[in-house]
Amino acid sequence: MNADIYQSLRSRWFWVYSILFGGFVAVMFATGITESQIIGFVGLSRLMVTFMQVSMVILPIYVLITTVRSVVGDRESNVMEYMLSLPVSFSGYFWGKFAAKFLVTYIPVFIALFGAALWGSLTKLDVPWDLFMLYSALLAAMIFCFLGISMFISAVAHSQDLAISSAFVLWLLLVAFLDLILMGLLLKLRLDAGTVIGIGMLNPLQVFRTAVLVLFDPDLTVMGAASYFILDTVSRELFIVFAIAYPILLGGLFGWLGNYFFNTKDIL
């Protein structure tokens, strides 16, 4: 794990990624976004909502593209053969990479969000610490989910090109099956609304987006008619718990499957 963290710290993409989030928060402060108001959200609450929307766009594709080469890349470059000659188990190697990737992806995002809260506190802004904790948990869950999927693809793929292509296609499918496509399915196939929304909630991106909106707008007015079905089926609190637990379970499942494949198949 330490070797992977050190390698990531030497990568220019890690520093571009870290500076991107830190710089984005700085720009939002500089442009006065904390002084704008939407549906009662003002100050740091407004900044955090915008930060989460941007994170939904950047984080999944970043995790997928940077992680899917982890295992298959080591195999193609013969690094894996050297690593496994050391006193380390297959599972130790796999989960070590998993943990290292999680830390180097999550920590810069958390620091950017915490830095915004700290700066707001120093400048006498109201700091919504409850929202900060929930947003931090949602970000961790989303990163964990896509990390598990990425490690599974990396363990199964036969080449780096195939791994990257698979990750990109998966990303396009998940983005495609957000609200507009689901609404189109409902109109085209005349499916029951509950069925369509239930299918949509299998998409971790949709779950993350809806959870952010629930924290932003408790009545989900921006989602239109779908909000009635969601909030009538589960309470706001229960949905937030689901939005954190489901991606973690999904990422853990794919991580376990990736580790199982890695331990049982001919990896070299």
Image (cartoon, rainbow, N blue to C red):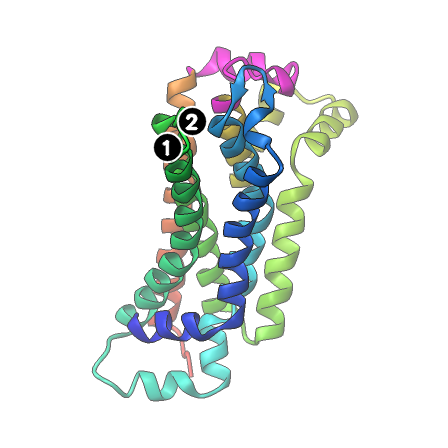
- Left or right: 250 in relation to 28: left
Q: Is residue 174 magenta?
A: no
Point out the residue furthest to the right here.
Answer: 188
The secondary structure that most of the magenta stretch takes on is: helix
Q: Can you see residue 202? A: no
Q: Is residue 179 above or below residue 100?
A: above
Quadrant location of the C terminus? bottom left
Residue 140 occupies quadrant: top left
Q: Amino acid at mark 2?
A: Leu
Q: Is residue 169 above or below residue 51?
A: below
Residue 85, image x and y in percent?
28, 88
- Left or right: 149 in relation to 88: right
- The residue labelled by disc 2 is 125
Name the residue: 58% across, 40% down.
30
- The residue labelled by disc 1 is 121
Q: Is residue 216 magenta?
A: yes
Residue 152, image x and y in percent?
45, 61
Quadrant location of the N terminus? bottom left
Q: Can you see residue 226? A: yes
Label 1 element class: helix
